[in-house]
Amino acid sequence: MENMKVHKKSLLKRILEHWVVYLFLAPAVLYIAIFCYGPMYGIQIAFRDYTIIEGITGSEWVGFDWFQRFFESRMFSNILGNTLILSLYSLVAGFPMPIILALMLNYTANKFKRVIQTASYLPHFISTVVMVGMVVAFLSPRNGFVNTIIEFFTGKTVYFMGKPEYFRHVYVWSGVWQGIGWGAIIYVAALSSVSPELHEAAIIDGATILKRMRHIDIPCIMPTMVILLIMNFGSIMGVGFEKVYLMQNSLNGSTSEVISTYTYKMGLIDQNFSYSSAIGLFNNVVNFILLVIVNKIADKLTGTSLW
């Protein structure tokens, strides 16, 4: 008990001594408290038959009825499958690409390195709406340059946006193109901290560029890779709403309907707020569980973790 009192006094003393630092920290803490933790009060909507007139606390408590309805829905397996496939495909295709680009840039001459970096960063700053518009225009069966090339060799065109089997490939690889340069920034920064003496010693020993990458660069950036992989797994169920919704149409709906778009349609279009809240809560709980599991596994295997 005495130790706790001493600890509290020392903490208060440190706060008073460095009050300016805590003053700068206060806006961030308030922002998180108001906009991240405050809205959690509304989670109870998922367990109530919510109506706007009766309000959150006045609506009837129904327990897990909405969750049961979602699990028993004919859409459940399709939506969950689409979400997982799209997320895992994006992770497998998109996670290694920035690492590969960063490693390549690390061995590129400075004058070419700047040009490549600038060209690869630019797509990140294109808005989702514009980017989807560009993808649709590029893949258009009438005048898209991709179909112009395909027609030149095969005499036929392909309606990429209208065929379910092409949706996932278009979604994932357009995302890789847009994010590869921006994602490489953190790895380029990590590689810049690698001691040049290690590379000099490896060159003297006759190591090739590939061997230097394997035995020097990758081990040095491994902690960064593990942390980012854990964070990516923590949002494995969180497929972005905007891009999927903009690329979605009645023809590719069988592979493009994911949890985020289904939640939007149930909540804002059909105004079934309790049902959509239950789906969103289920999604977030699964993400949290995956984050904890992957973090634990990473800690056991590599000794690097978020906590």
Image (tube, helix red, strand yellow):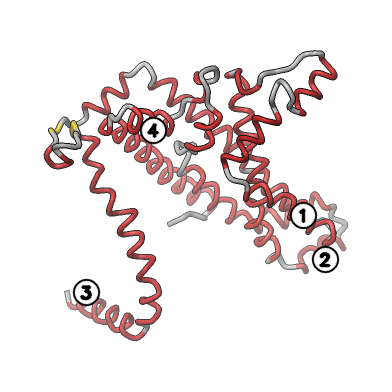
Name the residue carrying label 3.
4
Tell which circle, 2 or 3, labels the residue nearer the N-terminal end.
3
User: Which mark is nearer the camera, 1 or 2?
Assistant: 1
Name the residue carrying label 2.
200
Name the residue carrying label 4.
264
| Quadrant of the frame with the N terminus | bottom left
Task: Residue lying at the far top in this picture: please name it.
Answer: 155
Judging from the image, what secondary structure is the residue with disc 1 in? helix
User: Which mark is nearer the camera, 3 or 4?
Assistant: 4
Could you tell me which residue is drawn at 40 percent across and 46 percent down? 292
Residue 244 position in % (x across, y down): 52, 32
Residue 45 position in % (x across, y down): 22, 38
The disc placed on residue 105 is 1
Three-letter code for the amino acid on which mark 1 is drawn:
Leu
User: Is residue 277 positioned above or below 225 on the image?
Assistant: above
Could you tell me which residue is drawn at 14 percent across and 36 percent down? 59
The disc placed on residue 60 is none
Three-letter code for the amino acid on which mark 4 is drawn:
Tyr
Tell which circle, 4 or 1, labels the residue nearer the N-terminal end.
1
CB-based contact (under 8 Å), mark 2 and mark 4: no
